[in-house]
Every structure is written in C-alpha cells, then in structure tokens.
Image (cartoon, rainbow, N blue to C red):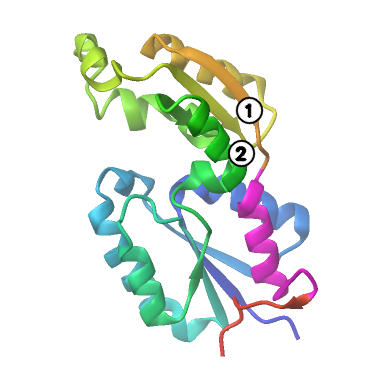
C-alpha cells in the first residue's frame, strides 16, 4: 500500500517539485506551498510552517519541509525539531541546488556574488527590481549592489529564455555574468530519499513513527 506523503515547500520550489513528481511518478506526493515573498520577511517563515504542519499532520502519513534555513537563524529547525520533521539540507536554495562543495567553491572564488535560480531569473522584477524600487530609482543600484562583482545563474533546466532573463538581470545590475547548470541537486536527492523512505540502501530518517 502506497502511503500518502506531504511536502510543505517554499513557493519558489513549486515548479521543480511538480516536475520531479511528474517525471518520477510520485502520484502519492502532495504539495502545499508558502508564498515565496516571505523570503523578504524570513522572521515569519517558521510560524507559517508550524501552522501548515499542525493543520495537515493528521491527514498524511509523513511530512517533509522543502525549505533550507532561508535566513531564519535556526527558527525553522526549532519548529521541525518540535514536530519531528526533516527539511532540505543547507542554508539556502543556492546551496542545495549547487551542492555544498560547489557552492562553497563559488563563494570562495568571489564573495561578492549575487545568485539566481530558474525561479529568480523568471521573476527577477517581482522579487528584486520592484521590492528594491530599482525600477523607480535606478540610482539605488550602487547602494544595494555596489560591493557585488558578478551574477551567477544556477540553472535547474536548460531554458534559453531563462538564460537570457538571467543575463538581462546581470546587465541591469551592471555585474559580470556566469552560468552554472546544476539541475535539481540536493532537492532531487532529498525528495527521492523522503518519497522512497531510503537513503543509500538504508532506512531513511525521514520516515516518521
């Protein structure tokens, strides 16, 4: 019997999780998302997660949280420890998409790097330009990005439109551009472990009692 599972995710990961669900045949995986705009208010994320978990915990056999720490300073981990639930590895989506070692190498090579994913490349205006009012006050570019040197686009898919959008974002910010194709990285491997309940052939800790 296939047990129903729930992934509570940042809205910025909805497209990737849906794609993995389709290609891997995870019909028993259900997805509930929290607005990606909360990344601008990280102090609210842990509370929203707690509400979602407690709302749906009785309806599913297992729950997994598709967030990294995401600037919450450990607040997400505190909630998940209380609820007995696991999350994605790392500090943020750039790290789990690129992998810890590759991201560390990128950060060491150039600390002044602004990172994009497929989601951020597609929604750059909504999540960067407009909140920072760069569309109305382009002179603010130096205040926000004066210490940055480059944009690194960590792509999940090979999409020419998104690649051009990422290049346009780098041009807007007047930064050098670099493209690193990552695929789904640790998002895929972590969800695979959760859905199958196994990791490297062993029983996985994502299975809840």
Q: Is residue 92 left or right of residue 144?
A: right
Above or below, comparing residue 157 to residue 207 in the picture: above
Q: Is residue 198 magenta?
A: yes
Above or below, comparing residue 179 to residue 3 in the picture: above
User: What residue do we see at 26% from left, 14% from top?
Assistant: 141
Q: Which mark is residue 180?
A: 1
Residue marked by disc 2: 102
Observer-nearest of 161 and 46: 46
- State the quadrant of the N terminus: bottom right
On the image, the x and y values in percent for residue 133 come to 22, 21
Evaluate if marks 2 and 1 touch, with contact meaning CB atoms under 8 Å apart: yes
Q: Is residue 177 left or right of residue 155?
A: left
* Span of residues in magenta: 184-201
On the image, the x and y values in percent for residue 179 come to 61, 22
User: What residue do we see at 57% from left, 15% from top?
Assistant: 164
Above or below, comparing residue 116 to residue 2 in the picture: above
Residue 22 occupies which quadrant of the picture?
A: bottom right
Q: Is residue 187 magenta?
A: yes
């Amino acid at each position: 019997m296939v047990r129903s599972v729930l992934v509570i995710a940042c809205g910025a990961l909805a497209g990737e999780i849906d794609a993995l669900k389709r290609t891997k045949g995870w019909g028993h995986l259900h997805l509930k998302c929290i607005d990606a705009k909360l990344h601008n208010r990280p102090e609210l994320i842990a509370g929203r997660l707690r509400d979602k978990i407690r709302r749906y915990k009785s309806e599913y056999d297992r729950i997994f949280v598709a967030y990294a720490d995401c600037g919450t300073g450990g607040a997400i981990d505190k909630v998940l420890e209380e609820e007995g639930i696991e999350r994605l590895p790392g500090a943020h989506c750039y790290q789990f998409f690129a992998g810890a070692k590759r991201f560390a190498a990128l950060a060491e090579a150039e600390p002044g790097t602004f990172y994009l994913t497929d989601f951020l490349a597609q929604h750059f205006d909504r999540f960067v330009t407009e909140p920072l009012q760069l569309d109305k006050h382009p002179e603010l570019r130096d205040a926000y990005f004066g210490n940055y040197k480059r944009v690194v686009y960590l792509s999940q898919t090979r999409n020419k439109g998104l690649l051009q959008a990422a290049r346009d974002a780098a041009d807007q910010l007047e930064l050098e551009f670099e493209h690193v194709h990552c695929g789904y990285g640790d998002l895929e491997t972590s969800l695979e472990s959760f859905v199958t309940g196994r990791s490297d052939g062993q029983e996985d800790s994502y299975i809840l009692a």
